[in-house]
Image (cartoon, rainbow, N blue to C red):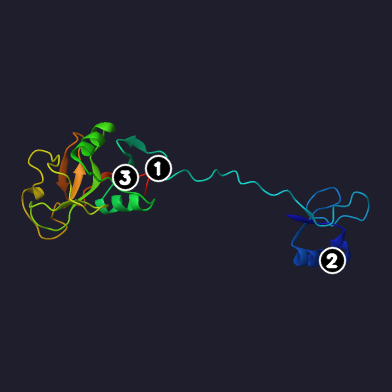
Amino acid sequence: MRYCGPMARRIGPWLAVLLSGCAFEGAAGTAGGVGDDGPDAGPDLVDAPPATDPTPPPPGRCDGFKAVGGSKYRVSTAAMSWSDAKNECDAVGIHLATFETVAEAATVAQGFPLTSTVWTGVIQNNSSRISGNWVNLAAGNAVPTPFPWDGGEPNDGGGWFPSENGAENHAELRTNGRFNDQYASRLNRALCECDEEE
């Protein structure tokens, strides 16, 4: 900020503000006055010290995530639909957790431990009943086999409905470390994964 001193008296206070962008400082250093031309007059267009930004730089994208195996994970605090869970992770440049190996799925399930069921990035890429085609959404590759499904899963809810509102096409990870196919509208917390190399 630059302060208007005697210059404001010579050309007029409002013109000084317009021409130089200065601010008023009175003879005693208080805002609002023009000051006199005596020894206590404010300086003529003196630069004020630059303001410092007390806000620290934004943390790294994976800061605050728990390292488990070769990746880092975080569970959301709120429960939400699968679509909202995907958006929650995508919004900060990460993705819902995916699993390249059976061992990785077991390691993640044991590494927390989970206190509630969570959404993952494992989806059925079409509406075919039970037949499979379960993929890791982020990579687009098939999930490893044998995938650690819970007993009797995936079962598509015990019956098949052709619409998205009826088909269980999204995998949730249960607290027992096993997976279940589930309706996308169910409210679960999101298990977000942050890969350092992304």
Q: Amino acid at mark 3?
A: Cys
Picture quarter with the N terminus: bottom right
The residue lying furthest to the front in this view is: 197
In the image: residue 166, left or right of residue 33: left
- Mark 3 lies on a secondary structure that is strand
Disc ID at residue 13: none
Quarter-of-image position of residue 129: bottom left
**Identity of the residue drawn at 82% across and 55% down:** 33
- Mark 1 lies on a secondary structure that is loop
- Gap between marks 1 and 2 measured at Cα: 56 Å
- Gap between marks 1 and 3 measured at Cα: 10 Å
Q: Are marks 3 and 2 in contact (CB under 8 Å)?
A: no
Disc ID at residue 12: 2
Quarter-of-image position of residue 15: bottom right
Q: Amino acid at mark 1?
A: Cys
Indicate the position of residue 141 as horizontal and vertical percent values.
21, 52
Disc ID at residue 192: 3
Q: Which residue is mark 1?
A: 62
